């Protein structure tokens, strides 16, 4: 059978774009369908604009300590409208760059919603096209819990569209997104409250990291309600009233409410039932280690599956898919040493096993090395801003199983260390390495 395309990609986010470009490099005919902006969540309403907001917030934090470094106090004003305009202009440039990349690679971009007709046929506004292989890379969408009045809340998607900064911001959820926005918006002068259902924020991170970040937020006077949930939201003349239940019983008032309770796979309205693609209970597409669904010619990568919801992971899955199917180089991902960071202040980052996971696998042989110290930047001021570093080891072999950090430059330091840990570095290797003084990273080389 002759097909219109060798590969049809549904979704032009990080995974879809990476797969399309890699497949095209092997000389296959590729089309990509995207009903929204090219680049997906990460570029348009996630990683990129979020990190730019982090940078903007850091100027406010630097202003707070500048006097201790000899700078005279002066009046400053933050223009949210001007800043967000600059952010959107930058995103537009990225979008245009993607268009040029696709055009140069000979990849057809279809700016419409598409659905499956069968395992090889796609419906594009009434037009049928066929493809030998189909890759689903539609990502996820924010989850809104079923709470009376939840329609008053916004998600991370709308945070970048706020016309002005709220004076009082309530955040439901203490994961990546909730914690990052809590510190950013607080730096801009917002009164921030975070409501988290668990005992600690940042579920899934090492306990010492969760504790260090949580204490850092509390020191910044961000109000945290843990072991608590929001049972109801009401509108009043004073603002939105959130009824908090659980460990805390209280009613708080907010001008804006951000729901940050996670993402769900964006797999509805794709006609997947027509292709008989199997889904999990949460709507995630079931795939094997090579990203293949139960249909031999249909694949899925990224947040629409039940694997790690991280942009670099989606890209890596996509490239592995293209190499396997079109490059005849079978590849599968190792998810054991994927580094990750939370760009809050204080910043947190991790790679490898947490202490709990390590003890589950290696038992009593696990050893942990920890240190907490005041970095040089904060030595001239009264503000207590400790950095926390932790290594998790297999005591029998000395191999580093995990590295975790809270403090300045945590993401960059852990990113660099991730290569060494994946290659099996030992504590002895670190001890014998000469550091750069004075830096935060050198502390990793002298843990006792």
Image: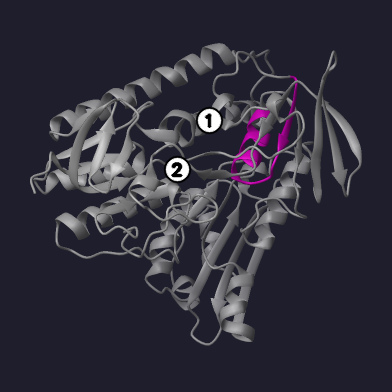
Q: Is residue 281 visible?
A: yes
Residue with the mark numbered 2: 267
Q: Is residue 240 above or below residue 291?
A: above
Magenta run includes residue 183: yes
Residue name at image x 67 percent, y 14 percent: 74
Magenta run includes residue 388: no
Q: Nearer the viewer, residue 352 or 288?
A: 288
Residue 277 spot, x, y in % from top left: 37, 53
Magenta span of residues: 167-185
* Left or right of 371 in this view: 168: right
Which residue, as the protein is rendered here, is positioned at the far bottom?
396
Residue with the mark numbered 1: 55
Q: Is residue 341 above or below residue 30?
A: below
Residue name at image x 64 percent, y 39 percent: 260
* Left or right of 278 in this view: 369: right
Mark 1 or 2: in front is: 2
Q: Nearer the viewer, residue 11 or 59?
A: 11
Residue name at image x 61 percent, y 41 percent: 344
CA distance for labels 1 and 2: 33 Å
Residue 412 spot, x, y in % from top left: 46, 49
Q: Report the number of discs.
A: 2
């Amino acid at each position: 059978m002759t097909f219109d395309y060798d590969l049809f990609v549904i979704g032009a986010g990080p995974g879809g774009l990476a797969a399309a470009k890699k497949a095209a490099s092997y000389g296959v005919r590729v089309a990509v369908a995207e009903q929204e902006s090219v680049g997906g969540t990460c570029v348009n309403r996630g990683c990129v604009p979020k990190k730019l907001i982090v940078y903007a917030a850091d100027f406010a934090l630097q202003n707070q300590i500048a006097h201790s470094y000899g700078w005279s106090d002066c009046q400053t004003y933050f223009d949210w409208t001007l800043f967000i305009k600059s952010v959107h202009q930058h995103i537009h440039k990225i979008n245009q760059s993607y268009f040029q990349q696709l055009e140069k690679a000979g990849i057809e971009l279809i700016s419409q919603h598409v659905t499956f007709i069968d395992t090889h046929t796609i419906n594009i506004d009434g037009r049928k096209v066929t493809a030998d292989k189909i890759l689903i890379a539609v990502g996820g969408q924010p989850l809104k819990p079923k709470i009376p009045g939840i329609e008053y809340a916004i998600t991370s998607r709308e945070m970048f569209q706020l016309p002005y900064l709220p004076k009082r911001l309530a955040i439901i959820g203490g994961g990546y997104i909730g914690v990052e926005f809590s510190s950013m918006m607080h730096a801009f002068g917002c009164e921030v409250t975070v409501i988290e259902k668990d005992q600690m924020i940042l579920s899934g991170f090492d306990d010492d990291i969760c504790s260090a970040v949580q204490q850092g937020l509390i020191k910044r006077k961000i109000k945290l309600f843990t072991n608590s949930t929001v049972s109801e939201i009401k509108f009043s003349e004073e603002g939105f009233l959130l009824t908090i239940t659980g460990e805390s019983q209280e009613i708080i008032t907010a001008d804006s409410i951000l729901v940050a309770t996670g993402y769900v796979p964006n797999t509805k309205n794709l006609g997947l039932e027509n292709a008989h693609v199997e889904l999990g209970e949460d709507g995630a597409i079931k795939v094997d280690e090579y990203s293949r669904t139960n249909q031999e010619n249909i694949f899925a990568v990224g947040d629409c599956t039940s694997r790690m919801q991280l942009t670099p992971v989606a890209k890596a899955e996509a490239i592995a898919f293209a190499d396997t199917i079109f490059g005849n180089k079978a590849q599968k991902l190792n998810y054991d040493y994927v580094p990750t960071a939370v760009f809050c202040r204080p910043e947190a980052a991790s790679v490898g096993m947490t202490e709990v996971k390590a003890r589950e696998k290696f038992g009593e042989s696990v050893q942990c090395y920890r240190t907490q110290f005041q970095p040089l930047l904060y030595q001239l001021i009264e503000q207590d801003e400790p950095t926390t570093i932790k290594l998790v080891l297999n005591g029998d072999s000395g191999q580093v199983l995990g590295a975790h950090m809270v403090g300045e430059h945590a993401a960059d330091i852990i990113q660099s260390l991730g290569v060494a840990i994946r290659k099996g570095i030992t504590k002895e290797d670190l001890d014998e390495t000469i550091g750069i003084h004075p830096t935060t990273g050198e502390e990793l080389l002298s843990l006792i």
